[in-house]
Image (cartoon, helix red, strand yellow):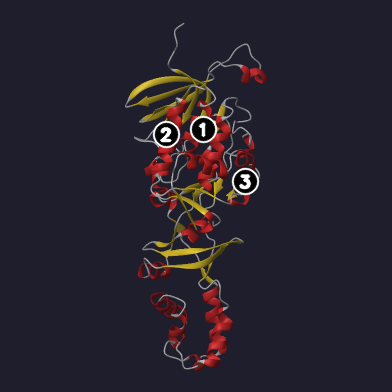
Amino acid sequence: MSFDFNQYDVIILGAGASGLMCAFTAAQRGRRVLVLEKANKVGKKILMSGGGKCNFTNHFVEADNFISNNPHFCKAALKRYSQWDFISMVARHGIEVEERKHSQQFCKNSAKDILVMLLDECAQAGVEIKTHCEIQNVKPLELSGHSDKHQHQDNRSRYQVSMLQDHLPHKLQCHSLVVATGALSIPSLGGSGIGYDIAKQFELKLTDRRAGLVPFMFSDQTKTLCERLSGLALEVEVTCNQQSFTENVLFTHRGMSGPVMLQISNYWHQGDEISINLLPYLDVVGWLIETKKKQGKLLLRTLLTKKLAKGLVKELQLLWWPQQAESSLAEMTDKQLICIANNINNWRLKPSATEGYRTAEVTLGGVDTDGISSKTMEAKQQTGLFFTGEVLDVTGHLGGFNFQWAWSSGYSAGLFV
């Protein structure tokens, strides 16, 4: 009997975190798996993540660490394949790990260790991977003689994938098709909207999408302030739309970045204000009034430089007390000090925009999870079509959660394709 090598049990679009995870999970079940990647090499986002050290998961993973129109959707996959399952695989491969604050798990040496591990698992399971693949179209194949409810038992091909590899056309067929194409963030690393196009083709709903985990830009005087402070980092608390995070802010030539700004960007919408508490562990009002009583001869900027960088204090002085710059605390009224203290604990700013998909670590929104099985990642109304990872409307906080979603959703789909 001749075998048509254009036919596969499973074709996976995208050789990123969730795609590779799905690939070897399915292949370990005896499925014949092909992964198609449009870039020149696989796992580009894995390699650049975490400053080249790959923040691959977190010790504390809960549904609250994820943003979705359906906050319960991620629970089944996270339970089926937890952070401990992935940590166990990392240990089995002898990868050295370091834990950083907020229980984040990083490679001690290089993100390459994680990619090599995934590729080793794929190789051992017999997964085939092709790069330089540009998907032209996907179409369903007619299956006659079987009702919908028996389609899962029918092993015939259900989808045809037309693609170009190195400009040469190919037509491939598969029983199960997995869309693990990522999303719109960082297009230079392969981000694209093809997964959304496929979802729309099969009449799956999409939620609104925007850049997430992304730095802020400013257009007013705050921009020039940020330029002057470029490179300065300090721990602050930032609040927007009833969500707060305490982490480092980094001033840049374009605005504000750093972990705390990336986190809060997931909750910010155009036109919103953000509130920055520059001294989150201090009641500044009480501190200033008390110091005025005991050390009235001090200048305010001299006092503040005990807690904040000199350059930042100089900028705040220009903003909030330029007329009293040379006045001692004793010469300033309590009302003036209270006003300045409130500004330090609640500095309200309105970003003009974020830096957008160019530098965003994730895309918020995506394929509406109402149309997807939380158990299998399969489209409810389209047998054999699966979606995993960032293309879905599930976005994690900074700290290893987006990778954990990739591992969990990829594994879940891999069990059922």
The answer to whether 169 appears left or right of 56 in the picture is left
Please tell me which of labels 2 and 3 falls first in the chain.
3
Could you classify mark 3 by the number of other residues whose Cα lies within 10 Å: few (under 14), some (14-19), or many (20 or more)? Answer: some
Q: Position of residue 12 (x, y in %)?
A: 48, 29
| Of the image marks 1 and 3, the number of the one nearer the N terminus | 1
The residue lying toward the viewer, choosing from 112 and 251, is 112
- Which residue matches tag 1? 22
The CA distance from mark 2 to mark 1 is: 12 Å
- Comparing labels 1 and 3, the label whose residue is closer to the camera: 1
Choose between 130 and 220: the one closer to the eye. Answer: 130
Q: Are marks 2 and 1 in contact (CB under 8 Å)?
A: no
Q: Which residue is mark 2?
A: 119
The Cα atoms of the two marked residues, 1 and 3, are separated by 24 Å
Instruction: Indicate the amino acid at tag 1.
Output: Cys
Nearer the observer: mark 2 or 1; the answer is 2
> Which residue carries the number 3 mark?
69
The quarter holding residue 192 reads top left
Q: CA distance from mark 2 to mark 3?
A: 33 Å
Q: Nearer the viewer, residue 409 or 115?
A: 115
Label tally: 3
Task: Classify 215 as above or below 200.
Answer: below
User: Which residue corresponds to the image point at 51% horizontal and 53% vertical from the top-left?
Assistant: 104
Q: Is residue 249 left or right of residue 66?
A: left
Q: Position of residue 310 (x, y in %)?
A: 39, 78
Q: For mark 2, does the 10 Å Cα neighbourhood hold few (<14), some (14 to 19), or many (20 or more) residues? A: many
Tag 3, which secondary structure?
loop
Q: Nearer the viewer, mark 2 or mark 3?
A: 2
